Image (cartoon, rainbow, N blue to C red):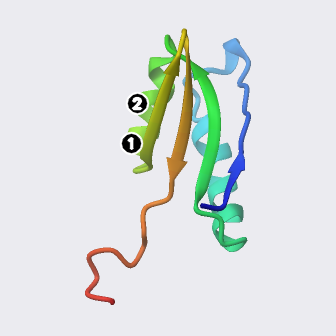
Amino acid sequence: MKTADLAQVVRDDCHNQGIWFEIISYHTSLAKRQRLQGFTGDTLDRNQPIFALINKMGFKVEMENESRVFKINLIFEDENQGRGRV
């Protein structure tokens, strides 16, 4: 699987303003143009807002818990899935 490692940090005083959503949306667009299939990255187990946003954005998520850090694979949904294409 061809993925890109993605690391993003949003300053504490800028949380809950849609910044992470915009960054990930833009990077997803760029990655799909390069025919990548998703992103890999790490997040702390206490970062519940990111888990909620990842689900909201429709990524297929694969996680591996190592101590208090989750290794995450965010896989792009197949755009042809469910459209009758073979």
- Residue placed under numbered mark 2 in the picture: 52
Q: Amino acid at mark 2?
A: Ala
Residue toward you, 16 or 42: 42
Q: Amino acid at mark 1?
A: Lys
Task: Pick the quarter of the image with the C terminus.
Answer: bottom left
Where residue 69 sits in the image (x, y, percent)?
A: 58, 16
Where residue 71 sits in the image (x, y, percent)?
A: 57, 29
Q: Is residue 86 left or right of residue 10?
A: left
Where residue 74 sits in the image (x, y, percent)?
A: 52, 46
Q: Name the element at disc 2.
A: helix
Residue toward you, 21 or 37: 37
Crowdedness of circle 1 by 10 Å Cα count: few (<14), some, many (20+)?
A: few
Image point 49% across, 10% down: which residue? 46
Q: Is residue 35 left or right of residue 79?
A: right
Q: Is residue 84 left or right of residue 53?
A: left
Image point 72% across, 71% down: which residue? 34
**Residue 37 location, quadrant:** bottom right
Task: Pick the quarter of the image with the N terminus.
Answer: bottom right
As displayed, is residue 49 above or below residue 82? above
Image point 63% across, 28% down: which residue? 42
- Residue placed under numbered mark 1 in the picture: 56
Residue toward you, 36 or 50: 36
